[in-house]
Image (spheres, grey):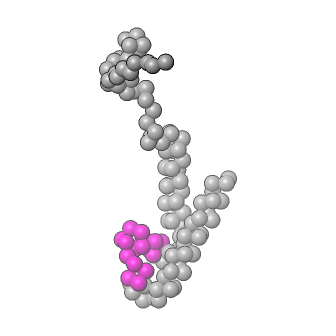
Amino acid sequence: MVRPISFVAIDDANESDEGGGGNRHDMIADEQALPVQDKIEREELGQLVAQKIQELPDIQRRVLAMYYHENMRLAEIAAVFNLSESRICQIHSRAIIGLRVQIETARNR
């Protein structure tokens, strides 16, 4: 069986709305939009990460800031602190591992 194809504008008023003023476009789900619960969880996670970063020792906090916010390479950070690049790498790794542990612990409560 062959059925005719008809095109409708999604911005035209929806006939079944009984004066609701909506259009078909409003009825189509936005697959790019995050559900509200996911947005809230992301915001809470961001706040938790920021809080845990503030609790890090000063040098770990400063290394993370230089690496992630100032986009400095480990060699450049090492020069600032007058330490070896491998020591800065250790400090960075210890900070990241510590943050992961604290965040996982907080999430499982």
Tally the numbered discs.
0
Q: Is residue 77 above or below residue 49?
A: below
Q: What secondary structure do most residues of the magenta stretch adopt?
A: helix
Q: Quadrant of residue 33?
A: top left
Magenta residues (range)? 61-76
Q: Is residue 81 above or below residue 37?
A: below
Q: Residue furthest right?
A: 109
- 65 drawn magenta: yes
- 67 drawn magenta: yes
Residue drawn where x is 48% and y is 42% of the image: 34
Q: Is residue 69 left or right of residue 36?
A: left
Question: x and y percent of residue 83 in the render?
Answer: 46, 88
Res 83 visible: yes
Q: Quadrant of residue 15?
A: top left
Res 20 visible: no
Question: x and y percent of residue 42 in the render?
Answer: 51, 50
Q: Residue furthest front?
A: 1
Residue drawn where x is 37% and y is 76% of the image: 72
Q: Is residue 53 left or right of residue 100?
A: left
Q: Is residue 44 left or right of residue 102?
A: left
Question: x and y percent of residue 38 in the render?
Answer: 53, 44
Which residue occupies the foreground of this view, 10 or 75?
A: 10
Which residue occupies the foreground of this view, 9 or 4?
A: 4
Q: Residue furthest top?
A: 18
Residue drawn where x is 50% and y is 39% of the image: 36
Residue drawn where x is 39% and y is 27% of the image: 26
Question: x and y percent of residue 80 in the render?
Answer: 38, 84
